[in-house]
Image (spheres, coloured by chain):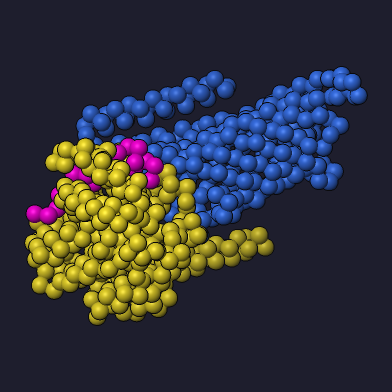
Amino acid sequence: MKKGKDTKSDATLLKFRSLLIQCRRHGIENEIKIAMRLDKKYITAFLILFLISSHSFYGQNETDQFRLRIAVLTETITHPGLSLGCSSILKNKQKTVVKKKATLERNSELVLISKIGFYQHRANHTGVLYSASIGQKRYVISRKLTHQYGLGFGGLTQVNSGVTYEIKDGDIEESNLKSRTYFHTFLFYEVGYPIKQSFRGYTRVQLGAKFPYNTYFSIVPIIETGVTLPLKLNTKKE
Amino acid sequence: MKTTALKGILMLIIICTQLSCSKDYVLESNMEETFYVRNGGSDMPVFVRGNGESNKILLLLHGGPGDTSVSYLNSAYSQQLHTHYAVAYYDQRQQGNSHGHFDQEENSLSQIVEDTHDVVKALQYRYGGDIEIYLWGHSWGGAVGTAYLQTADYQSEISGFIEVSGGYDFDFINQAVISKLTDQAEIELTQGNHIEFWKEVVDYIADLDVNNLTTEQSLDLNRYAGQIERDELIDDLYVIPSTEGFSEVNDKVTNPLSVTFNAISIFTQEYLIDELLSISLSENLNLITVPTLLIWGEYDFKVPVELGQFAYDNIGSVEKTFHIYPHAGHTTMRYDADRFFNDVREFLE
């Protein structure tokens, strides 16, 4: 089923590529731009949906494997926002390490996180972030802190503040589309800590890039602080 | 019950949408507005500030290329202008807070002129066709303004031009910079001031083929010129008040990272820099007929005062004024904000 889905997606992608080639051959500039925009958004949406859907494969057996994440964030320190996401443990590995003074139970998890969020840059733009990331989470079971690091990708849509004007056929008008979307890739480091019962807190530092930004790229630093709580998706044990 | 609640929410959304759509934009006494102008692959922000009751808008064409209009926004001279006039701070494509995606080749002086024309159209559409728009170009922005006024009938949309240290002809700039640096070096070396720096300048110029400068050499001359102001290497040059420093970091409107990476892209890709170094707009200065105010600094080593004099002698405007600010450098208005405000006010009134 998964394979069939991919094949269908590949076929759609090929259609877009073929459209692009045709447009280039006929020198239809606008169509190229529209197709490229659709193409870019399509690929981003496809990858994110694919990763989110993988939660359903991995996150249904144990309740703590699937956690909801709610956080406040700041982009470039001064632009506040919110983020909502979910995480799944893809792989879990335990290791016992014997040291001189104690024996430590070390846990290592491969974690998938999908999230959506926004930030507000006053009088400039609103940024909508959607991404999927994969990270390695390490902790000693008897200790409180967890450390996680990894990388992710997704999209960043910049919605312009105020009206966006555009000249069409010689006349100026208010544009219906007042946003632009960029690819967004990032590295992150996250510290987790217990708050109460199954609630856990976390602080995440994320440094990423948005591109193609004008003719180059730009940096997107994000600091996120929030809580995670377990979601019980499927209580029926197999 | 649920249906009623849903209907209520739907009505509320419709009312809010209608209210947001029906907003009329007027020039008010205390303006703080942002809008964007889209042209091709670029979305360019326009930050409108100040008192619009005079019905006059100064459209700032910032310097660079690679600068942002927001670095002018909080300065003392701008704050004074805001008390009487509205100022539209517009970030040119690939600069400041502008964003989008396009090929390097699409960033040229002629493209920026087209963008500026779209901004003028947007201002007229937004605030009414009877508003008076004055171009205020500084340095590279002066070149953009000059090119704009020389293009088609664009100047018919403009009520006047304020050019501050406009770099409208780079060959002319290079020759004038070499001559000014050489003359000043002689004075400073005679007086025994900053001998190491001025000797370096003299030696550098001696090795140049002055009629055939490379891009690197032009930029080196520009760096020497900048160093004179930055390190206060001439006693007669005023020190810029500390409150007149770059302000974009303090202004929450701007995104310093976008500004920085846009500037890096301009300087690493060099396409627009090459465009800058090949600017030659001297020949058609006579095409400019709108009232023009020219302001230059006596100690401007980046775009020497000779360019101001040449512009004054050659533009076709009947109403034209030329002021040289003594003790001032390249960002002339930063050295004497009060005088700048008074000169602009006299020109506009």
Depth order, front residue of A176/B111: B111
* A165 to the left or right of A90: left
Depth order, front residue of B193/B283: B193
| Residue B282 makes an appearance in the image | yes
Q: Where is residue B325 in the image (x, y as percent from the top left)?
A: 27, 68
Hey, which quadrant is residue B100 in on the image? top left
Hey, which quadrant is residue B88 in on the image? bottom left
User: Which quadrant: the N terminus of chain B?
Assistant: bottom right
Depth order, front residue of B68/B92: B68
Q: Which residue is drawn at 66% across and 41% down?
A: A204
The colour applied to the residues of chain A in this rendering is blue
Hey, which quadrant is residue B86 in on the image? bottom left
Rendered position, A109 above or below B246:
above
Rendered position, A47 above or below B201:
above
Report the magenta residues as a range.
Answer: B263-283
The colour applied to the residues of chain B in this rendering is yellow
